[in-house]
């Protein structure tokens, strides 16, 4: 079903796409793919013109590439240790960090209301956009091109943790216990997408702190992403 065209803050990204291609390290044969990857649903005339479907594909391309890279990089670690590393590297805060590093925020197409609400600084929105860009590179240049992008921007992140990190929910629970606070509380705040590919919105609350929300393709993934976002906020307080 076609939606009425949303009010846009702009009809094109705020900065020249050629500059973004240079930052991405990839030149598109079909620039329309990159433009779609940068288009949030609030600024799209219809769902199929937003980056939501690309986000779905990009998540899978990223997961496959990171999994292969981890197995190559840490041949002596078992499945559990690799899983902790994997979860940390594909979470929304990590994707948002990469999005900021390559300069995606000023290029994202948003409606006026979404921009006024701080969409360009929303970690979940930026993470979704980063996944969509990975998918756009994959569709335009194939798996090798997408893998090259992921390798370029995730290898350094892998090297930051000498030991496998704990999962975000465990770390948040330990933080709350160390502060003498009740355990974090999680709730499903929303769900979207088709039945075969749902996207869950989960909210985590810690006593005396504003709640954090994040999305994921499963309840567990969304909980981990929300916990990771809360940890980022708590880290900014110290």
Image: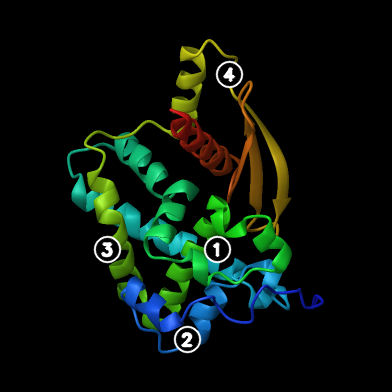
Mark 3 against mark 1, which lies toward the viewer? 3
| Residue sitting nearer the eye, 219 or 113 | 113
- Tell me which label, 4 or 2, sits earlier in the chain: 2
Element at label 4 = loop
Q: Sort mark 3 into few (<14), some (14-19) or many (20+) by Cα contacts within 10 Å.
A: few
- Tell me which label, 3 or 1, sits earlier in the chain: 1
Image quarter of the C terminus: top left
Q: Which residue is mark 2?
A: 31
Instruction: State the separation of the CA atoms marked 4 and 3.
Output: 38 Å
* Residue situated furthest left in the rendering: 76
Residue 176 in the image: x percent, y percent? 52, 18
| Residue sitting nearer the eye, 115 or 90 | 115
* Residue situated furthest bottom in the rendering: 29
Residue contact at pointers 3 and 1, CB within 8 angstroms? no
Q: Is residue 110 above or below residue 221?
A: below
- Tell me which label, 4 or 3, sits earlier in the chain: 3
Instruction: State the separation of the CA atoms marked 3 and 1.
Output: 21 Å
Element at label 1 = helix
- Tell me which label, 2 or 1, sits earlier in the chain: 2
The quadrant holding residue 45 is: bottom right
Q: Residue at x 29, y 35 (%)?
A: 164
Q: Which residue is mark 1?
A: 56
Q: Which residue is mark 3?
A: 152
Element at label 3 = helix
Q: Residue at x 56, y 39 (%)?
A: 226
Instruction: State the separation of the CA atoms marked 1 and 4.
Output: 32 Å
Residue 128 in the image: x percent, y percent? 54, 60
Instruction: State the separation of the CA atoms marked 4 and 2.
Output: 47 Å
| Residue sitting nearer the eye, 166 or 43 | 43
Mark 2 against mark 1, which lies toward the viewer? 2
């Amino acid at each position: 079903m076609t939606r009425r065209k949303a009010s846009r803050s702009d009809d094109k990204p705020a900065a020249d796409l050629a500059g973004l291609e240079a930052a991405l390290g990839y030149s598109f044969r079909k620039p329309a793919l990159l433009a779609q990857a940068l288009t949030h649903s609030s600024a799209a005339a219809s769902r199929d013109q937003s980056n939501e479907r690309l986000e779905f594909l990009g998540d899978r391309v990223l997961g496959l590439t990171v999994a292969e890279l981890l197995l190559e990089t840490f041949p002596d670690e078992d499945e559990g240790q690799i899983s902790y590393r994997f979860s940390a590297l594909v979470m929304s805060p990590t994707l948002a960090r990469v999005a900021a590093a390559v300069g995606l925020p000023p290029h994202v197409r948003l409606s006026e209301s979404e921009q006024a609400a701080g969409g360009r600084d929303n970690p979940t929105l930026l993470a979704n956009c980063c996944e969509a860009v990975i998918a756009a590179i994959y569709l335009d240049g194939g798996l090798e091109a997408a893998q090259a992008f992921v390798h370029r921007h995730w290898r350094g992140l892998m090297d930051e943790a000498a030991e496998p990190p704990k999962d975000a929910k465990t770390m948040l629970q330990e933080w709350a216990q160390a502060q003498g606070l009740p355990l974090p509380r999680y709730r499903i705040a929303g769900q979207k997408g088709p039945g075969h590919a749902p996207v869950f919105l989960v909210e985590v609350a810690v006593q005396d702190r504003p709640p954090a929300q994040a999305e994921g393709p499963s309840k567990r993934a969304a909980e981990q992403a929300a916990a990771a976002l809360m940890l980022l906020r708590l880290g900014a307080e110290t």
